[in-house]
Amino acid sequence: MPASRIAPPSPVQRLTFTASDRPEAQEARERLIARYGDAGEDAEAVVALGGDGLMLETLHASLASRTPIYGMNRGSVGFLMNDYAEDGLLERINQAERALIHPLAMTALDAHGVTHTALAINEVSLLRQTRQTAKLRIVIDDKVRMAELICDGALVATPAGSTAYNLSAHGPIMPIDAHVLALTPISAFRPRRWRGALLSHTARVRLEVLEAEKRPVSAVADNFEVRDVLTVHVVEDRAISLCMLFDAGRSLEERMLAEQFSS
């Protein structure tokens, strides 16, 4: 999900607010609406109050409108959020740095012959469903690159998602403007020392489940899950663009760079 800088639009004046179900987030929403109003569907920016989970939900909810999203941390994990402050909100939003991101498109065929489609802003993951390890075949641009990967699963991550599940699975952090995707194994058993690959953002990834009846696998695109998959195709969808806003000097690019030097 590479990001790029875009020209600043006209100044934002109309806001709408969304919040997680945490009490502090709900209370913050009420105070901010009382102060700035709520333009609803006519809003020029969405202010998301919560943690990274809420930001992900808000990005998915904005797929149709493509309204820019400015997050403020009222949750537990706020890597994608700005610091919370009620003063000067419009000024902060209009001075914010913008990241234009593109999701992954997942097409999954299940054991019943049903095809499922979904979009993922962070990653598409394949995960074993039982005590049995998964066996996967990895095909990139119609060429078999790994005939058999025995593992707990594997994932394809965007640069924006590279600090999420991908990082926990020991995948690389990628610059937000990198035109690459990370293909990362989850607890690989054979080949044990394989740590994954970096792929062009134009790559067409196909993950095939081997011995699917004995070793069932689910596929997850962010929060959308398909059980008992046989084949999963993943590509970046550059026809869809989403915009996140970050305080000046605290861009997503800067945060991801700093994360690589954190202890």
Image (tube, grey):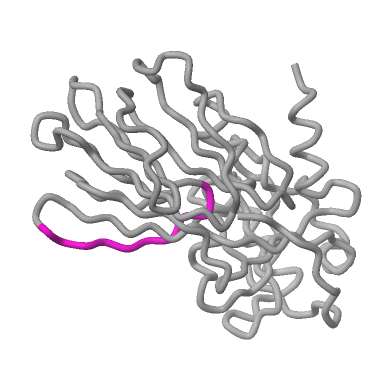
Direction from residue 124 to residue 229 in the image, left or right: left
Provide residue 221's location: percent of width, then percent of height.
Answer: 39, 51
How would you classify the magenta stretch by its main secondary structure? strand
Question: Looking at the image, which residue is at 56% across and 74% down?
Answer: 239
Residue 128, above or below 11: above
Residue in front for this viewpoint, 7 or 154: 154
Residue 159, above or below 146: below
Provide residue 167's location: percent of width, then percent of height.
Answer: 57, 29
Magenta stretch: give its range.
113-122
Q: How many marks?
A: 0
Question: Looking at the image, which residue is at 55% across and 23% down?
Answer: 170
Residue in front for this viewpoint, 253 or 238: 238
Quadrant showing the C terminus:
top right
Provide residue 249's location: percent of width, then percent of height.
Answer: 90, 48
Direction from residue 39 to residue 214 in the image, left or right: left
Direction from residue 241 to residue 229 in the image, left or right: left
Direction from residue 208 to residue 37 in the image, left or right: right
Residue farthest to the front?
A: 143
Residue farthest to the bottom?
A: 42
Residue in front for this viewpoint, 65 or 204: 204
Quadrant showing the N terminus:
bottom right
Residue in front for this viewpoint, 63 or 194: 194
Question: Looking at the image, which residue is at 18% across and 26% down?
Answer: 130
Decide whether residue 239 is among the magenta residues: no
Q: Which image quadrant for residue 90?
A: bottom right
Residue 203, above or below 198: below
Residue 201, above or below 187: below
